[in-house]
Image (spheres, rainbow, N blue to C red):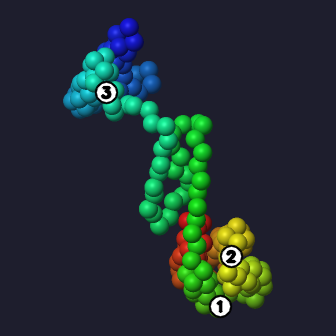
């Protein structure tokens, strides 16, 4: 019963006109012809999947598992990796390298040598906070990231404001590198 219903939906919707719908007007014949092959292939794949479902041939592929483990090897992950539905629990661990953070912070401040003293006065307390965390045996990553986020926000404001034209590309690149090292992407 379900397969028959889904088959009728596929037959109704897997048409060139539906795939290339442009409001209420009819698309040009040339556009329809160009889409015919793609729609035909998609329709054949859908019909094959429906036949597999009807015969139970997809049972192993769609079997539910009790738990899902995602292992992600990446330099930067922006956003989450959650899979497995709404009741899943996700933990995200960011490992920060104190040496890399210290080196990128130093590099950023070398690039900031020619900026106005007022801007440096805003940035120095945040840099001191980061440096004080980095000398601890177990730095608090939240404090490091929040102070780094403040540095990034202040510099982005300066880059977008009146100082933006005077700032070198080195500052922008150093800021991007620093942001990536502290896990802000």
First in sequence: mark 3 or mark 2? 3
The Cα atoms of the two marked residues, 2 and 1, are separated by: 30 Å
Q: Nearer the viewer, residue 149 or 101?
A: 101
Q: Which mark is residue 58?
A: 3
> Residue 134, how many percent across, how many down?
67, 82
Q: Residues within 10 Å of mark 3 (few under 14, many from 20)?
A: some
Please name the residue shown 35% across and 13% down the image: 3
The answer to which quarter of the image holds residue 130 is bottom right
Which is closer to the viewer, label 2 or label 1?
Answer: 2
> Residue 33, how many percent across, how many down?
22, 28
Q: Residues within 10 Å of mark 1 (few under 14, many from 20)?
A: few
Q: Is residue 32 above or below residue 178?
A: above
Q: Residues within 10 Å of mark 2 (few under 14, many from 20)?
A: some
Q: Is residue 31 left or right of residue 155?
A: left
Quadrant into which the C terminus falls: bottom right
The answer to which quarter of the image holds residue 29 is top left
Q: Nearer the viewer, residue 123 or 96?
A: 96
Q: In this orientation, does residue 130 appear?
A: no
Please name the residue shown 67% across and 76% down the image: 138
Q: Nearer the viewer, residue 44 or 29?
A: 44
Reading the image, the residue beneath label 2 is 139
> For the residue labelled by badge 2, is the local secondary structure a helix, a strand or a loop?
loop
Reading the image, the residue beneath label 1 is 114
Quadrant into which the N terminus falls: top left
Q: Is residue 57 above or below residue 176?
A: above
> For the residue labelled by badge 3, is the local secondary structure a helix, a strand or a loop?
loop
The Cα atoms of the two marked residues, 3 and 1, are separated by: 65 Å
Q: In this orientation, does residue 133 appear?
A: yes
């Amino acid at each position: 019963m379900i397969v028959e219903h889904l088959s009728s939906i596929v037959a109704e919707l897997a048409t060139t006109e539906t795939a290339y719908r442009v409001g209420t007007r009819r698309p040009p014949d040339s556009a329809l012809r160009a889409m015919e092959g793609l729609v035909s292939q998609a329709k054949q794949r859908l019909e094959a999947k429906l036949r597999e479902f009807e015969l139970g041939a997809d049972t192993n592929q769609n079997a539910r598992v009790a738990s899902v483990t995602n292992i992600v090897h990446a330099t930067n992950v922006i956003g989450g990796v959650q899979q497995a539905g709404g009741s899943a629990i996700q933990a995200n661990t960011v490992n920060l390298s104190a040496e890399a953070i210290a080196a990128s912070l130093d590099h950023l401040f070398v690039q900031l040598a020619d900026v106005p003293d007022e801007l440096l006065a805003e940035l120095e307390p945040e840099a001191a906070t980061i440096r004080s965390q980095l000398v601890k045996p177990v730095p608090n990553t939240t404090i490091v990231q929040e102070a780094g986020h403040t540095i990034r926000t202040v510099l982005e404001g300066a880059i977008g404001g009146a100082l933006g034209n005077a700032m070198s590309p080195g500052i922008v690149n150093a800021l991007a590198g620093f942001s990536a090292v502290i896990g802000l992407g």
